[in-house]
Image (spheres, rainbow, N blue to C red):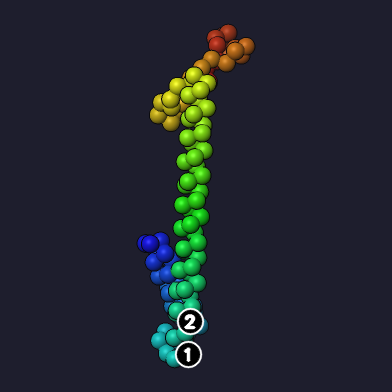
Amino acid sequence: MSTLLSWAAFGAAVRWWQLGIQMRPFFSRETALGYPLYIGAFGAFGYWLQGVEMNQTKILEERKLTLLEKRRKAGLGELKGNWGPTYPVEGVKGVGGSEVVVV
């Protein structure tokens, strides 16, 4: 809800700025209709954007659970911090012939 109100307030500020650039009076009969239009348009945009954000968050959470389940089934264990499991890469030699470990 706060996102919606923030975008609506931004719409009012945009109208205020537009009238200031045009050097027209902020509150008069001719300019009064613009405020509700801008507030409504930017409020609708904020409502749409909030839905997009919620949908993306849900998709990312589902994807994270899918990846964690794949790792669990592969026997790689749980994530440790932000790095994940470590395991050696077969057939790849590092400097001095030591085995390379992927983190």
> In the current view of this chain or complex, which residue is farthest to the right?
91
Name the residue type under label 2: Gly
Q: Residue 30 — which label? A: 1
Q: Position of residue 85 (x, y in %)?
A: 47, 22
Q: Position of residue 26 (x, y in %)?
A: 42, 84
- Mark 2: few, some, or many residues within 10 Å (few <14, many ≥20)? some
Q: Position of residue 17 (x, y in %)?
A: 46, 76
- Mark 1: few, some, or many residues within 10 Å (few <14, many ≥20)? few
Residue at the (52%, 38%) spot, across then down:
63
Q: Is residue 87 above or below residue 32?
A: above
Quarter of the picture containing the N terminus is bottom left
Q: Mark 1 and mark 2: span between their CA atoms?
A: 9 Å
Q: Position of residue 86 (x, y in %)?
A: 48, 19
Q: Is residue 66 above or below residue 75?
A: below
Residue at the (62%, 11%) spot, across then down:
91
Instruction: Name the foreground residue: 30 vs 94.
Output: 30
Residue linked to disc 2:
34
Name the residue type under label 1: Glu
The number of callouts visible is 2
Q: Is residue 88 above or below residue 25?
A: above
Label 1: state its secondary structure: loop
Label 2: state its secondary structure: helix
Instruction: Name the foreground residue: 1 vs 8.
Output: 1
Identify the image quadrant of residue 36.
bottom left
> In the current view of this chain or complex, which residue is farthest to the left?
2
Identify the image quadrant of residue 25.
bottom left
Q: Residue 66 — which label? A: none
Q: Is residue 76 visible?
A: yes
Residue at the (50%, 42%) spot, across then down:
60
Residue at the (46%, 26%) spot, across then down:
84
> In the current view of this chain or complex, which residue is farthest to the bottom?
29
